[in-house]
Image (tube, helix red, strand yellow):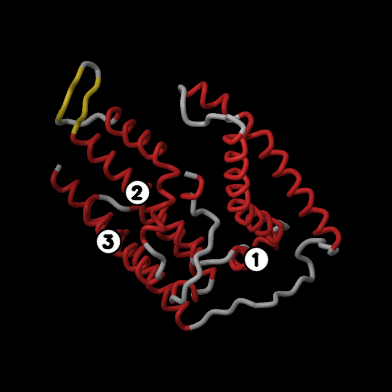
Amino acid sequence: MLRDITLGQYYPAKSIIHQLDPRVKLVTTILYIISLFVAKGIAGYAVATVFLVMVVKMSKVPFRYITKGLKAVIMILMITVIFNLFMVNGEVELWRFGFLRITDKGLRTAVFMAIRLIYLIIGSSIMTLTTTPNDLTDGLEKLLGPLKKVRVPVHEIAMIMSIALRFIPILLEETDKIMKAQTARGADFESGNLIQKAKAMVPLLVPLFISAFRRANDLAMAMEARCYHGGDGRTKMKPLHYESRDKMAYGVSWGYLLLMAVLSFAQGFYGVMLL
């Protein structure tokens, strides 16, 4: 399960998505997430599906590798679907057992919510899989640059996010090593009920926290030894600048969001007319 978490991992490949400016990928990801919440009805989700498939193919990242990240959130996905399925009331009752009932609106909401969460995770994974943590840091700092005028520590925020993304694969690898070591000493992380499994995690969490604090302390000492003092006066080894492909990607992304907004408005207008 731990190896299935793809957040923070970079997949090297020669694709146009990898070559895009990190600012373009950050903005496009935000626009795609907004579009998922704007989408209404089958037409909107069909356009979102076409857009996502197109980006996945252009990224040259194996689809099986991208979907591995879904295994880590399958429980959250199931809980969300079940709550929407049974707790959303509708006009037409499809199934009933005691106090449990499924309506047409509940079924539609559950399906659309599941699709929305899956697409959101896949879309976010594509951004991290095709962008190195350093590029993400530079892109985020550049995008948030105007906030420096109101004394927002933009460089420090970007650095924190970069370090967090870098530490995710390291901590996952450390967790896997500790689990194997504890299993060799007789620890059981699989059998038992939920409470027993939670108690079995204690021998795992204590050394993991100690390792994480030790790594954080080593990193802080290394940064101090290199006289790190924030973003004032710092220069970039690879300054960011837009290419023609980046401007084209911006146009496609904003055009996609505009299309989703039009479809959503048309869906709402058509529903009002039917009433």
Q: Which secondary structure lies at badge 3? A: helix
The residue beneath circle 1 is 145
Say above or below: 54 vs 65: below
Q: Residue at x 57, y 35 (%)?
A: 183
How far apart, in angstroms, are the residues tagged by discs 3 and 1?
Answer: 33 Å
The residue beneath circle 2 is 116
Residue farthest to the top, as pictured: 98
Q: Is residue 46 left or right of residue 132?
A: left
Between 270 and 128, which is closer to the camera in this rendering? 128
Q: Position of residue 185 (x, y in %)?
A: 62, 32
Tell which tag, 3 or 1, sits nearer the viewer.
3
Q: Residue at x 51, y 45 (%)?
A: 2
Type of the residue with mark 2: Arg
Q: Residue at x 71, y 43 (%)?
A: 211
Q: Considering the image in quadrants, where does the C terminus appear?
A: top left
Proximity of marks 3 and 2: CB atoms separated by less than 8 Å? no
